[in-house]
Image (cartoon, grey):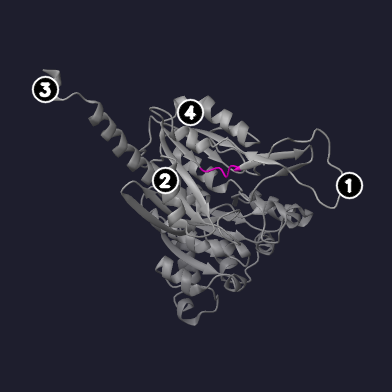
């Protein structure tokens, strides 16, 4: 869509409504004018005050608002909108939309508008599969409503399956079209990213691992791809789909990750070691399942290969970025790791109950020789974009410094 778009955003009563302030912000960032209409249930999950603050417009919710309806406000809104977006669209709302109900302001607007209507369903996966819901969504689609999603994954109820509302960025792209390509500071480079945990076998059914979900590493890989790089993602065992236009190689153990890293590192301009690699592994893995036969069990442990340090020590190796997950004295430990391993940059965060591991957001401190920067709590996808921008900036400076060092002096040329 070109020019300034008028978007009427309808919010219904689902837990995914908590994402709508971000959706409004993203629409505004793309130049859209946003008018929010909430159902009564939506107010249980997100406040009109928040949405008014991010949209810059009063939020409408009542069909019988005397002041607004004195000027036929619902008809005016219906004509004003270039597109109507319902996010989240609950099962209950889809049923009313299918029935042609004019029960409240939002359903009335959907009947009164001539603008395209797009809906982002959000509900439990069993509800999504229910025959009545399927019939309702088939009905609204047959009448021209465009359904965005739903996505598949973890749900607020603790279950997994199709029914998640698609992310705000995907909704914005569907509503306004793909954004204008941004600056691609890593164009022409190859970036190797490690992500996720490793598993170190004890026997055929047991292993030692850690809490890493791989979300941060996958976000870094996607951000590097969007910045123009060719990306090779070396991933431990995670429950995440392979990112588009990224070469993903799955590994299991620290030794496998070490081997995969050194099989691809010669091509790398930048190495980003996000993976949580096991520091120790069982000295010997049993060939058969260890039976519960004694009160105590001892396992001899040996050091795993240090993937990050091995890359940092390479002659003419890539710009090397490490990650440090610490439970205490984060700054102190990160700076020691930066110096001790000979890294170009380190990204450090505090971990613990409800922090970083297996979460969708994170906060980090970044250190390099002679500088540092702090990034507050943000979604990992957004944080990764900012981190890749910083990595690209530091990589460019380091590359120019190396070139300047390698150039012969004027006297030597003479």
Q: Reading the chain from its start, which is encountered first: label 3 or label 2? A: 2
Q: Which residue is disc 2 drawn over?
A: 338
Q: Residue at x 57, y 32 (%)?
A: 258
Q: CA distance from mark 3 to mark 1?
A: 78 Å
Q: CA distance from mark 4 to mark 2?
A: 20 Å
Secondary structure of the residue carrying tag 2 is helix
Circles 4 and 1 in contact, beta carbons < 8 Å: no
Horizontally, residue 378 falls left or right of residue 372, namely right
* Above or below for 55 versus 412: below
Circles 3 and 4 in contact, beta carbons < 8 Å: no
Circles 1 and 2 in contact, beta carbons < 8 Å: no
Q: Residues within 10 Å of mark 3 (few under 14, many from 20)?
A: few
Q: Residue furthest bottom?
A: 66
Residue 68, image x, y percentages? 46, 77
Q: Which residue is disc 1 drawn over?
A: 293
In this rendering, which labeled residue sits more in front, label 4 or label 1?
1
Q: CA distance from mark 3 to mark 4?
A: 36 Å
Q: Reading the chain from its start, which is encountered first: label 3 or label 4? A: 4
**In magenta stretch: residue 150:** no
Q: Which residues are magenta?
A: 274-279
Secondary structure of the residue carrying tag 4 is helix
Q: Residue at x 57, y 73 (%)?
A: 43
Q: CA distance from mark 4 to mark 1?
A: 45 Å
Q: Which residue is disc 4 drawn over?
A: 265
Q: Which mark is residue 411?
A: 3
């Amino acid at each position: 869509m070109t020019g300034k778009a008028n978007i009427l955003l309808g919010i219904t009563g689902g837990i995914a409504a908590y994402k709508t302030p971000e959706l409004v912000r993203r629409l505004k960032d793309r130049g859209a004018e946003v008018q929010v209409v909430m159902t009564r249930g939506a107010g249980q999950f997100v406040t009109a005050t928040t949405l008014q603050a991010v949209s810059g417009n009063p939020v409408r919710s009542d069909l019988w608002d005397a002041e607004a309806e004195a000027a036929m406000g619902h008809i005016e809104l219906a004509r004003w909108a270039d597109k109507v977006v319902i996010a989240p669209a609950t099962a209950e709302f889809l049923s009313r939309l299918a029935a042609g109900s004019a029960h409240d302001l939002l359903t009335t607007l959907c009947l009164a508008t001539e603008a395209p209507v797009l809906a982002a369903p959000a509900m439990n996966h069993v509800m999504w599969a229910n025959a009545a819901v399927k019939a309702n969504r088939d009905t609204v689609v047959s009448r021209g409503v465009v359904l965005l999603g739903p996505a598949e994954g973890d749900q607020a109820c603790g279950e997994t399956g199709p029914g998640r509302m698609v992310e705000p960025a995907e909704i914005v792209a569907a509503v306004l079209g793909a954004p204008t390509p941004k600056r691609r500071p890593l164009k022409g480079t190859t970036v190797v990213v490690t992500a996720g945990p490793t598993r170190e076998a004890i026997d055929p059914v047991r292993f030692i691992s850690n809490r890493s979900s791989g979300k941060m590493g996958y976000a870094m890989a996607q951000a590097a791809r969007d910045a123009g790089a060719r990306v090779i993602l070396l991933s431990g065992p995670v429950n995440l789909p392979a990112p588009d236009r990224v070469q993903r190689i799955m590994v299991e153990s620290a030794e496998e990750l070490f081997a995969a890293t050194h099989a691809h590192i010669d091509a790398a301009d930048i190495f980003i070691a996000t993976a949580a690699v096991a520091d120790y592994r069982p000295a010997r893995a049993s060939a058969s399942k260890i039976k519960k036969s004694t009160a105590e069990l001892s396992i001899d442990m040996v050091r795993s290969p240090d993937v990050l340090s091995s890359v940092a020590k390479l002659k003419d190796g890539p710009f090397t970025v490490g990650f440090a997950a610490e439970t205490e004295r984060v700054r102190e430990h990160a700076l020691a790791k930066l110096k001790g391993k000979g890294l170009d940059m380190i990204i450090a965060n505090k971990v613990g109950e409800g922090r970083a591991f297996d979460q969708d957001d994170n906060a980090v401190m970044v250190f390099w020789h002679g500088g540092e920067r702090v990034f507050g709590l943000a979604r990992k996808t957004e944080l990764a974009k900012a981190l890749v921008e910083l990595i690209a900036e530091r990589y460019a400076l380091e590359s120019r410094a190396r070139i300047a060092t390698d150039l012969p002096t004027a006297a030597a040329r003479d």
